[in-house]
Image (cartoon, rainbow, N blue to C red):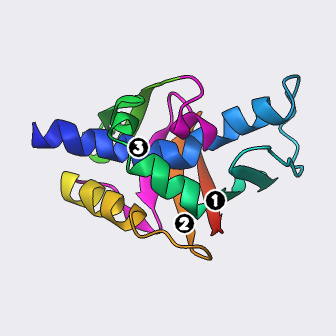
Amino acid sequence: MKQLFAIKLLVVAMAFAMTILSFAQKQANPSYKSTKSRSVKLSGPVKKIRANVYEISAKWFHKEISDPQLLFQASTSVYRDGRTKKFLGYKIDHIEKNSTLATMGVQIGDIVVEMNGTPLNSLVMLQAMYVSLQEVTPGSKHSLKVIRNFKNAELKYHFVN
């Protein structure tokens, strides 16, 4: 039970970073399909500065992450290297459309491997990550490293008032 709860917490934190991308692009311009970097101003609490870099309202984020329903907006599974069986991270198996996680750029199929330079290679690290997200303040910066489509990607978040 604790492991399931921790995995859901990881999903929340990971999706917090990743889901913004796709939802933000669709909200700003429904016909947007380009992968070119460009500034997109959103009407909500998330603003895309450039490719994979976002400004997020710290107040909005605190409200979203404190909502227990956030844990049910996505599901994850442990992801291991197929050959070595080494634990690599948490794979995003499902994200609710228009959820907080989707808004922050997290996508189905992403494998979250690191947050703020710390590998997410255990349940303890996942719980520590979730706790650290509770302490987000305006001016703080966070990053989420993922494997997306077999390539490394980093999502960066700058929290503002």
Q: Are marks 2 and 1 in contact (CB under 8 Å)?
A: no
Residue 98 drawn at (x, y percent): 60, 27
Distance from disc 2 to disc 1, alpha carbons, whole Å, reads 13 Å
- Amino acid under disc 2: His
Q: Name the residue rendered at 88%, 43% in the picture.
A: 36
Q: Secondary structure at mark 3?
A: helix
Q: Name the residue rendered at 34%, 57% in the picture.
A: 130
Magenta stretch: includes residue 99: yes
Distance from disc 3 to disc 2, alpha carbons, whole Å, reads 14 Å
Q: Quadrant of residue 97?
A: top right
- Badge 3 crowding class, 10 Å Cα cut-off, few under 14, some 14 to 19, many 20 or more, is many
Q: Is residue 27 left or right of residue 82?
A: right
- Badge 2 crowding class, 10 Å Cα cut-off, few under 14, some 14 to 19, many 20 or more, is some
Front residue (pair 133, 84): 133
Can you identify the residue that label 1 sits on?
A: 57
Can you identify the residue that label 3 sits on?
A: 12
Q: Name the residue rendered at 43%, 32% in the picture.
A: 92
**Residue 124 visible in the snapshot:** yes
Can you identify the residue that label 2 sits on?
A: 142
Q: Are marks 3 and 2 in contact (CB under 8 Å)?
A: no
- Amino acid under disc 1: Ser
- Mark closest to the chain's N terminus, 2 or 1: 1
- Mark closest to the chain's N terminus, 3 or 1: 3
Q: Which residues are magenta?
A: 97-122
Front residue (pair 90, 135): 135
- Amino acid under disc 3: Val
